[in-house]
Amino acid sequence: MPHYGQRHISDGANETKAEIYEAMAVINRSFEQIMTALYRLESKGVLAEDYTYSQEVPMREMAARINCYVLSKVTDRELDDRNHYGRMRASAEKRRKS
């Protein structure tokens, strides 16, 4: 939150970043909901225990693969942001000292 007299830097990147993290949360919750539903069906006798477990392993692997891929892209972006705003901060501090 900007302080009085400060400019707020907003080029839409923060909103996009929030959307990315929200999408990741949706994906992870969805995988969890699928597994919960499968185990519910198992508890009702609809699915065999070995079937549910055999589906959980590849499902968890897929979720981890998606997370790793997305996080690798997000990490690149976060590093770019850190470097960009670090340079901006250093420049502002230098101007204040002058």
Image (tube, rainbow, N blue to C red):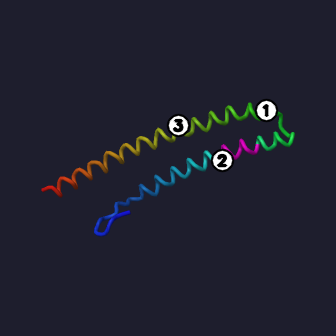
Q: How many numbered marks have been drawn onto this rendered protein structure?
A: 3
Measure how far apart labels 3 and 1 are at the Cα level.
26 Å
Q: Residue at x 61, y 38 (%)?
A: 63
Q: Circle 2 sits on which residue? A: 30
Dot 2 or dot 1, earlier in sequence: 2
Which numbered disc covers residue 12? none
Q: Which residue is mark 1?
A: 51
The answer to which image quadrant residue 7 occupies is bottom left
Question: Residue 41 location in percent, x, y?
Answer: 81, 43
Q: Is residue 15 magenta?
A: no
The quadrant of the picture occupied by the C terminus is bottom left
Q: Position of residue 95 (x, y in %)?
A: 17, 56
> Considering only order in the chain, which callout, 3 or 2, is on the residue closer to the N terminus?
2
Q: What amino acid does circle 1 point to?
A: Tyr
The amino acid marked with disc number 2 is Ser
Label 1: few (<14), some or many (≥20) within 10 Å? few
Q: Farthest residue to the left: give it.
A: 98
Answer whether residue 35 is magenta in the image: yes
Mark 3 and mark 1 residues within 8 Å of each other at the beta carbon? no
Of the numbered discs 3 and 1, the one sitting upstream in the chain is 1
Give the number of the disc on residue 68: 3
Residue segment shown in magenta: 31-37
Main SS of the magenta part reads helix
Task: Give the residue type that dot 3 points to.
Answer: Cys
Residue beneath the point at 52% across and 37% down: 68
Q: Residue at x 46, y 54 (%)?
A: 16
